[in-house]
Image (cartoon, grey):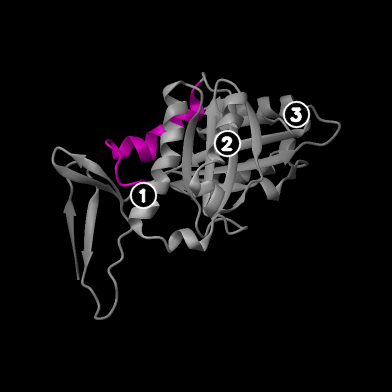
Amino acid sequence: MSTTTQRPEGGTSETTEAKQPGLPKIDVNEYGGKKEGVRQSMNRRLFMQLLAFDVPVNVNANDVASELGKLLRSRNIPGVIYADTMSPRGLGLLTWSQDPSLFVRDVRPLFTEEFLRSVTLRQDMAMIGRSYSTGHEPDLEFALLKRPINNVLSESYPWHVWYPLRRTGEFARLEPIDQSHILREHASIGMAYGAQELAHDIRLACHGLDAQDNEFVIGLVGPELHPLSHLVQAMRKTRQTSEFIAKMGPFFVGYVLERSSG
C-alpha cells in the first residue's frame, strides 16, 4: 500500500510506502531550503553526458562539428560541441536531459550517421552524472534543472573544463558537522569566483554510473581559460582536496564550437 501527496511548492509528489519490518525507509528526493515556510523537495534531476572523440586524419574536425551541430538542432537534441584543446583532431559532445534514456535513444544513433561512423571514441574521457542538491538551495528547481543548462549554453562562457573525482572513504566516515565545515570552505571559494564572473560550476553526482568508480563530475565554465585553471589551483589548498580527494581527472578542456538548446 502506498499514498501519494502533492507538494505545493514544486508540484512534486511524495510517496509513502508501507514500511516492512526491519527495513529502512528509502528517500530518493532532493531537498532545498524552505520556500514560503515549507522545505522544498523534488524527485527530479538533470543528467548530463560528455563524449569525446577523434576524427580521422583526412577529415576537418571543425567541419564535423558544424554538421553535428546542424544535426542536433534538426533533431531537437540539446547539446554543446567542443574543440578538444588537447587533441588537434578531437571533439567533445555534451548532452543533457531529465530522462537519461535520451543518451541511448537519441544520442547513440548520432554515431551511425555517415560523417561520424569513422570517429574514434575516447572512453577514458567519457563522463556522466546527475544534478544533486546540498539541502540549502533557495530555489531547488532552478538549481537542479535550469542552472547547469544556463551555464553551458551561455554565449559568455566559451571555455569549459570537465573532470571526475572520487573522495576517500575517510570523508564518508566523518561526522556530518565536520563534513559541513569542509564543504563550506570549498563552496565559499567557488562562490567568490562566480561573484566576479571568473568561473561558474556544474556539480554532478555519478555514484555507480562511472566506469572508474568516480563519485562526482565537475564542470567549470567561464569567459577565459586562465581563471578556470586558477580555481582548480585554489581548491588544492582546501581541506577537502588536500586530505580527502583520492583521484581527480582526466581533465577535458573544451572550447565551444556549436550549441543547441534542443
Q: Amino acid at mark 2?
A: Val
Taking the view exactly as shown, the residue that stands out farthest to the left is: 37
- Residue 239 is tagged as none
Seen at 54% across and 47% down, the residue is 241
Query: Is residue 10 among what the camera can see?
Result: no
Q: Where's the N terminus, which quadrant?
A: bottom left
Frontmost residue, 248 versus 107: 248
Say whether disc 1 or disc 2 marks the residue closer to the N-terminus.
1
Which residue is under mark 1?
A: 180
145 horizontally vs 210: left or right:
left
Residue tagged by mark 3? 61
Quick check: 217 left or right of 140?
right
Few, some or many residues within 10 Å of mark 3 (<14, 14–19, 20+):
some
Find numbered disc 2 in the image and state the secondary structure of the residue it sits on.
helix
> 73 above or below 251?
above
Disc 1 on helix, strand or loop?
A: helix
At label 1, which amino acid type do we have?
Ser
Q: What is the C-alpha distance between the residues marked 2 and 3?
A: 29 Å
What range of the chain is rendered magenta? 133-154
In the image, residue 36 lies at what x, y percent?
14, 37
Crowding at mark 2 (Cα within 10 Å: few <14, some 14-19, many 20+): few
Q: Nearer the viewer, residue 109 or 69?
A: 69
Nearest-to-viewer mark from 2 and 3: 2
- Left or right, residue 217 beside residue 255: left
Q: CA distance from mark 1 to mark 3?
A: 44 Å
Disc number at residue 232?
Answer: 2
